[in-house]
Image (cartoon, rainbow, N blue to C red):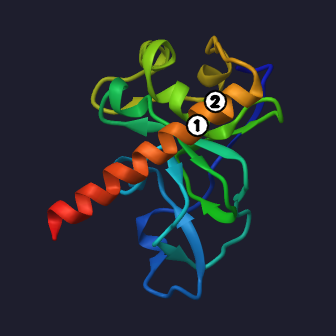
Amino acid sequence: MGLLASFTKGNGYSKKDLVQDSNQTPIILYGSLYTNYKTNIEKVDTFARVKDKTIYSSGNDVVVPASGESAEDISRASAILKKGIILGGDLNIIHPLPDLNAIFLAITISNGTQKRELSRRAQGKSVVHLRNQDLKQVNLLYPNLEEQQKIGSFFKHLDELITLHQCRYTN
């Protein structure tokens, strides 16, 4: 994957930095990837005041937790298609090249062969870690961009249907 993307890391924010003010800047923390978000992040409901050296989403990013409780948990990804969202600490950030669809990449990282490969690369016992260097070494198989977009759209729609049915079930 190192030839298909550039990589950065989230910076300087934790749960204690969250504020209840929706006039502040939206933020994604690594823990919320496990609880609040699916493959595609379109709406963020947590906010923080901007600090120095803040890292923002560029509008076509994929984020992967840098730490977690197990190798399987950490081997998951979400696409962020919106610009200007703060990307908090403990997030690996992937900026795919134009011929790689962010939603497709997030699906690929979170499933199948790539998920197993990332799980093997995760290091640690009680808390496991995954670094951008590990992500760069992942072998990625992918179709042409048009096919990636179709696959991404299909799974995005499927996520929306699941969310809709979960809301109906809850109510």
Residue occupying image coordinates x 32% and y 49%:
162
Q: Which quadrant would residue 124 be assigned to in this image? A: top left
Residue 111 placement (x, y as % from top left): 44, 23
Residue 132: give its label: 2
Residue occupying image coordinates x 63% and y 55%:
11
Residue 59 placement (x, y as % from top left): 73, 55
Looking at the picture, does residue 51 appear above or below residue 130?
A: below
The residue where tag 1 is placed is 152
Residue 128 placement (x, y as % from top left): 38, 29
Q: Quadrant of the N terminus?
A: top right
Q: Amino acid at mark 1?
A: Gly
The local secondary structure at tag 2 comes to helix
The local secondary structure at tag 1 comes to helix
Q: Quadrant of the C terminus?
A: bottom left
Looking at the picture, does residue 42 appear above or below residue 119?
A: below
Left or right, 120 with respect to 25, comes to left
Residue occupying image coordinates x 49% and y 15%:
121
- Comes first in the chain, label 2 or label 1: 2
Residue 130 seen in the figure? no
Looking at the picture, does residue 158 appear above or below residue 76?
A: below
Looking at the picture, does residue 1 appear above or below residue 90?
A: above
Q: Residues within 10 Å of mark 2 (few under 14, many from 20)?
A: some
Residue occupying image coordinates x 70% and y 58%:
55
Residue 115 placement (x, y as % from top left): 45, 20
